[in-house]
Image (cartoon, rainbow, N blue to C red):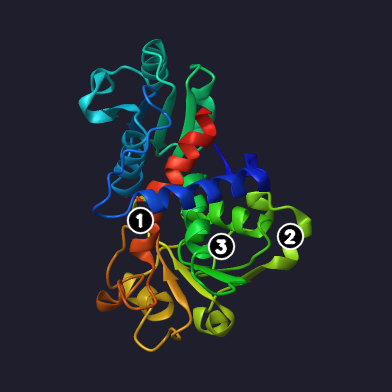
Amino acid sequence: MSVDQLTSDDVNTIMDRAEFYKGRFKLGKDKKVGGLNGRTMINMFFEPSTRTRISFEQAAKRMGMLVSNIIADASAMAKGESSIDTIRTLGAMNFDVVILRTPQSMQPYELSTFTSSAIINAGDGTNEHPTQALLDYFTIQKLGMDVKNITIVGNIIHSRVAKSNTKLLLSMGYNVTLVGPNGWVPEPKEWNIPEEQYGQLNIGTHLRDVLDVSDVVMTLRIQQERFSDTHRGLIDLKDYNKEYGIKHGMLRDNQFLMHPGPVNRGVEIDEDLVYCPQSVILDQVENGVAVRSAILEHVLT
Ligand code: CP
């Protein structure tokens, strides 16, 4: 449900196992590793997804699981069945694990009370995206340099990726700087960050002021679809790009650029820099399959 539920031992075990799976999932190799043969998983996505849904499906199939997908619009939910009745119905089919993506913050907690299946949060509203944070942490560990300072830039207040990453990275000892327009960065209390971690956390409004000390710059998708709920001030996308977009000459050779995807090209990152030499965006995607295999193994065994 949340990165808060993970001990550092859990995280380290998942990282070790993800390393193993990454080695087994190389192009041209037989990727069927087994380990969860005959166990069952359903992807239940009430919001669009490419990376999370497909990487969970691939992770599960490579481990020998039997996988189904339910898309809200093409299910009985389109005929008015509630999400609670849907999860009860799927529970009756004895799925071992449900991967849930929902626009409703905290819905995974609510639905978990109506099923005996394990639920893995694949992103709930503006709350959390814990498996994204784990794959991002894995990617940071693989950068081949001593990373200490991570800057997360953008629409922080609406970003479940920022929230899960901030909490996980702080708990694993990194310094995290959150940068965004006024009103787009929450107070640490809003995310229940423990007071003893406040010294590792910086808040800024100007990306250029903090670039020098950033080993990694994690950019975030501007989620225009979320502006209507906890609306804290709209901004013109061109103005946003001028102040917070990644542009030519901004990053040093030994800095890294991350983005959970999908990228609004020309907004968070200039068009021709999405896959620049500093970009590890596709490494994040590749690592997602290995990390989610390790997560399935951790949850189910
Ligand atoms: N990073 C991420 O959650 O991407 P998708 O929406 O494509 O799953």
Question: In the rendered structure, which amino acid carries the disc numbered 1?
Answer: Val
Residue 24 in view of the camera: yes
Nearest to N terminus: mark 3 or mark 2: 3
Point out residue 266 in the picture as x, y percentages from the top left corner.
28, 73
Q: How far apart are the alpha carbons under marks 2 and 1?
A: 29 Å
In the displayed structure, 20 sits above or below 209; it is above
Kindly identify which residue carries mark 1.
285
Residue type highlighted by circle 2? Gln
Element on which disc 3 rests? loop
Callout 3 amino acid: Val
Q: Is residue 179 visible?
A: no
Quarter location, residue 277: bottom left
Mark 1 or mark 3, which is nearer to you? Answer: 1
Which residue position holds label 2? Answer: 197
Q: Residue furthest left?
A: 74
**Secondary structure under badge 1?**
helix
Decide if residue 122 is on the left or right side of residue 224: right
Q: Residue furthest top?
A: 92
